Image: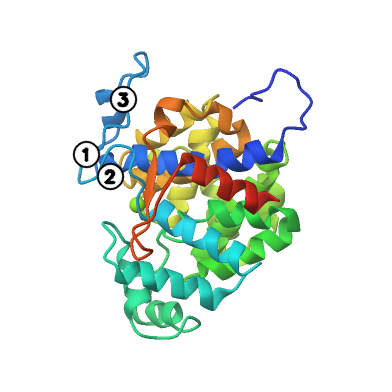
Amino acid sequence: MSPPSPSGTGNPDLVRRAAGAVIGSAVGDALGAPFEFGPAGAFSGRFPASEPSSEMRGGGGWDAGEATDDTQMAVLVAESLLERHGLDLPDMFTRFQRWAAADPKDIGLQTEDVLTNGLPWDRAAAHHFRTNRRAAGNGSLMRATTSAVYFARGGREATMDAARRIAALTHGDPAAWEGTALFHELVRVALGGADPLAALPAALALVHPDHRDRYATVLADDWHPDQATQFNGAVWPCLGSAVWAVRTTTSYEDAVRAAVDLGGDTDTVAAVAGGLAGAFYGVDAIPGRWTAPLHVPLPGFDGRVLRAPDLSDLARRLAS
Ligand SMILES: [Mg+2]
């Protein structure tokens, strides 16, 4: 990756980067959705990089430009933070439950179980983890861009702590908390105009020791998604793959293309990569042919559908 601005000032506009993060994640989600669970290279096979076209065509049950549960939940997180003027975990959980009860097109198996098992907000995810012992999906990481923008102002430790607490609403496995905390910190650094990859060692030092080595492995400079030992629906390879996509490309567009081309959980890997790349390159780097058809339905919330200008407004409020 390289700095997007020829000015070299290293002092870009926070609002432009915040909008880049929020819209960038949503665009990655919508671009990746039709390719979910497909093979590597399917996106570039259908849409060669040398021939830019209207890649937002939909498919697999998704309309062109339609964002999935990743972005829908990120919007719920954002609206709770803004309307409650900070972290109100019971309120956020209630919004998640209202959404889950409205039968969204897509919802993670674990998230659905936690939101519908009838237990209160501070016990539902822990109960699921105790019962299943498998709770390190990428479902808390996928929705973290909005909270990462909101908590960036608090500094490294505060944003990582907030990430863990929001992740714990649906994910009882501390591995998911730590991966989400790392993402929050990388976005914070990018919003400030610095290179998030250079901040990885300092961020890893704040990861719980039980989980640090595993994240250090997937975030290493020479790690490649082919080396993943699990499906990228798990939190470790998802974060590692998203960071790899940003590290090995030099534009927002190429980062998201690389993420979708990995195959597997394409909407989420691209949502995570797109959030980080959007924070780094800024909203102006996101192609208009991708933002124009973008829309985010919000099941359970009176038929509301957010479009790019709505996400831009949300990002501005989160950052200010
Ligand atoms: Mg999704």
Mark identifier at residue 304 = none
| Ligand 1 under 8 Å from disc 2 Cβ | yes
Earlier in the chain: of badge 1 and badge 3, it is: 3
Residue at the extreme left? 60
Mark 1 vs mark 3, CA separation in Å: 15 Å
Q: Nearer the viewer, residue 36 or 293?
A: 293
Give the residue number, with chain letter if any, for mark 2.
Answer: 36
Give the residue number, with chain letter if any, for mark 1.
Answer: 59
Dot 1: what SS?
loop
| Ligand 1 under 8 Å from disc 1 Cβ | no
Residue 148 location (% of width, % of height)? 61, 54
Q: Residue at x 66, y 67 (%)?
A: 85
Amino acid marked by disc 3: Ser
Amino acid marked by disc 1: Gly
Q: Is residue 96 visible?
A: yes
Q: Is residue 116 left or right of residue 24?
A: left
Q: Is residue 193 left or right of residue 55?
A: right
As drawn, 286 above or below 238: above
Q: Is residue 199 left or right of residue 146?
A: right
Residue 251 location (% of width, % of height)? 53, 25
Circles 2, 1 touching at the beta carbon (< 8 Å): no
